[in-house]
Amino acid sequence: MKIGVIASIAHAYPPENDGSWDHVASTLTEGFVARGHDVVLFASADSRTAARLHGTAASGDQDADRALHCAAAFERAAEFDILVNHAGFAPVTYSRLVSTPMVTTIHGSSARQLLPAYQAYDDVAHKVAPSVADRHPDLRYDATILPGIDPEQFTFVPEPGDYLLLLGPIHPDNGTHLAIDVAQQAKAPLVIAGNTEDESYYRESVEPHLDGVGVSYLGPVKSADRDALLGGARALLHLSTVADQFALPAIEALATGTPVIATPLGSMPEIIQTGTTGYLVPDVASAVSAVARIADLDRRACRDEAVSRFGADRMIDEYVALFARITGVNSAHHPSPTKRIGSPGLFSHTSS
């Protein structure tokens, strides 16, 4: 199958930080190549990929660069059986200008914010939701495909350290203050890692608690350090106060064997099997109780769940099956994959 992947050019592929949707898109792209498909990746010129790379500009966030990047993909649309959009809403506006079908993965927050725009193209845009919770009732979807990660990038840790971990943006919606409260009541050290998205919230609700012992803040964490940080934690705290988009750090934590304590909002009930891979908790008191019971959970079961339900190969296969249904192109006619996700040789630089 001939596949054109439209990526964001905000930064190079693969992104430095895991836990982002761009990393999932990068994993998909390399997986398509590994299965023998003919893939062109429209991304920043400084990206690395096993696909053929079409880069119109270096990574950045300039309006002109984004416009030229999007236009380049659709100027070549006739070359592909299908286009795969991971660059937001802008490419959707080109849908009626080409005959090549395009699949766009829409995350919950994007669907809510841009609902009228997506509805305007609902008749021609093929859409995927990354979870049932991400599906907007006023949009039509072709499939729900859970995100996947490469389990080989995460090390199973049977005996963790004693700290709790919060991995994600420092923002009231992400429940950073709740994680601090839980850790202090449970008398457990807390490590916080992520970007500070609300400076006043950080100064008022987070910084006063930082002592480097009970509560520590590491800042943003790159891919090279993420695996050890996740695997060394007793539990990942995901105490979001809103039903936000799919929580990628949760499945990354499970891949290391680390269970998750989370509020039952958004996609978390689809990710966590309470009493097996973590606990879904309605409030701080329940979360504190869950910390006391976290050692009762089998970390191997967490790892097995990540591999079976959230492995990249399963995700890639489901996308390819969807493409075959949409295009009528039988993917079985293409060469067998020579590499699977995690094999050496992926992410080498090529050009179109």
Image (cartoon, rainbow, N blue to C red):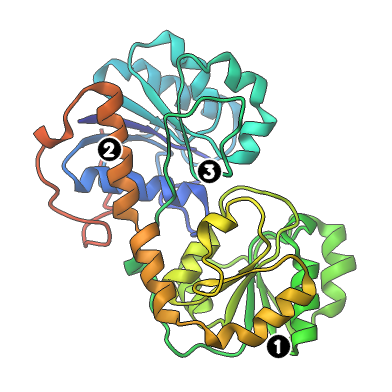
**Residue at 70% across / 88% down in the picture?**
188
Q: Pick whichever of labels 2 and 3 is earlier in the sequence.
A: 3
Question: Which sits in the foreground, 70 or 244?
Answer: 244
Label annotation for residue 320: 2
Label annotation for residue 132: 3
> Would residue 49 be seen by someone viewing this image from the given angle?
no
| Type of the residue with mark 3 | Val
| Image x and y of residue 38, in percent | 20, 34
Query: Where 301 falls versus 158 (above or below)?
Result: above
**Residue at 41% across / 37% down in the picture?**
43
Question: Which sits in the foreground, 290 or 212?
Answer: 290
Within 10 angstroms of label 3, few (less than 14), some, or many (20 or more) residues?
Answer: some
Label 2 to label 1: alpha-carbon separation:
44 Å
The residue to which callout 1 is attached is 188
| Type of the residue with mark 2 | Val
Q: Secondary structure at mark 1?
A: loop
| Type of the residue with mark 1 | Ala
Q: Pick whichever of labels 1 and 3 is earlier in the sequence.
A: 3
Label 2 to label 3: alpha-carbon separation:
20 Å
Within 10 angstroms of label 1, few (less than 14), some, or many (20 or more) residues?
Answer: many
**Residue at 35% across / 65% down in the picture?**
307
Residue 6, image quadrant = top left
